Amino acid sequence: MKLGRLNHIGVATPSIAESVAFWRDVMGATKIHEPFDLPAQGVKVCFVDTPTDAGLNGTQIELVEPLPGNTSIQSFLDKNPQGGQHHMCYEVPDIHAAKVWFESQGKRVLGEPRIGAHGTLIFFVHPRDMMGVLTEIMETPKSAAH
C-alpha cells in the first residue's frame, strides 16, 4: 500500500466559532472555509487552510464540533474540555485496497468506508493499533479542491 500526503489534522472543539477566532487571530490563518454539518457522522466541521508557499497545497486543520447525540467527539471533549488534536488523516489512492491492507496487518478498522467531510470515502483505524493516534484514511480527492 502507498500512503499519500497528510491531508489534515482533526481538532475536536467545543466551539467552532471560538476555534476559528483562534486560528485566524493567533495562528494567522487567512483561508477559513464555511462550517457545515455532517449529520451522518454527528459533527459540524470547518476546514482551516494552513499557509502555503509557491502554490503548493498546505495541510488543513479540520475543526470538529459534536452535534447533539454524538458520543465519540463529546466523550473526547469530556476528557479534554478545551478540545485538542483528535486525529490525523492521510490520503491513499484506493480506499478499499487500503482497508484490506490495514486489516491484513492486524489493524482494527473502525467501520466500513463512508463519505467524509471532503466528499470522498474514509475510514478510521483504532489508535491502539496506530501508536496511540486515531488515524483517518481518506481516498485522494479526484479534483484538486480539497
Image (spheres, grey):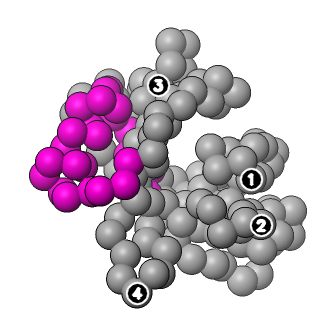
Q: Secondary structure at mark 1?
A: loop
Q: Secondary structure at mark 4?
A: loop
Q: Of the residues shown, which amino acid type is indicated by label 3?
A: Pro
Q: Within 10 Å of the Cα at label 1, are there few (<14), some (14-19), or many (20+) other Cα atoms?
A: some
Residue ID at (86%, 62%): 96
Q: Secondary structure at mark 2?
A: loop
- Mark nearest the camera among 4 and 2 is 4
Q: Of the residues shown, which amino acid type is indicated by label 4?
A: Ala
* Image quarter in which the N terminus is found: bottom right
Range drawn in magenta: 9-32
Q: Marks 3 and 4, how far apart in space? A: 35 Å
Q: Please state the horizontal and vertical placement of residue 80, each as a whole percent of the image.
A: 27, 34
Instruction: Answer whether residue 1 is magenta in the image.
Output: no
- Mark nearest the camera among 3 and 1 is 1
Pick whichever of labels 3 and 4 is earlier in the sequence. Answer: 4
Q: Of the residues shown, which amino acid type is indicated by label 1?
A: Thr
Closer to the camera in the image, 91 or 130? 91
Q: Are marks 3 and 4 in contact (CB under 8 Å)?
A: no
Closer to the camera in the image, 74 or 104? 74
Say which quarter of the image contains residue 55: bottom left
Q: Which residue is mark 2?
A: 142
Closer to the camera in the image, 64 or 103? 64
Q: Which residue is mark 3?
A: 66
Position of residue 2 relative to residue 6, above or below, is below
Position of residue 99 relative to residue 38, above or below, is below
Pick whichever of labels 2 and 3 is earlier in the sequence. Answer: 3
Q: Are marks 2 and 1 in contact (CB under 8 Å)?
A: yes
**One can see residue 20 in this view:** yes
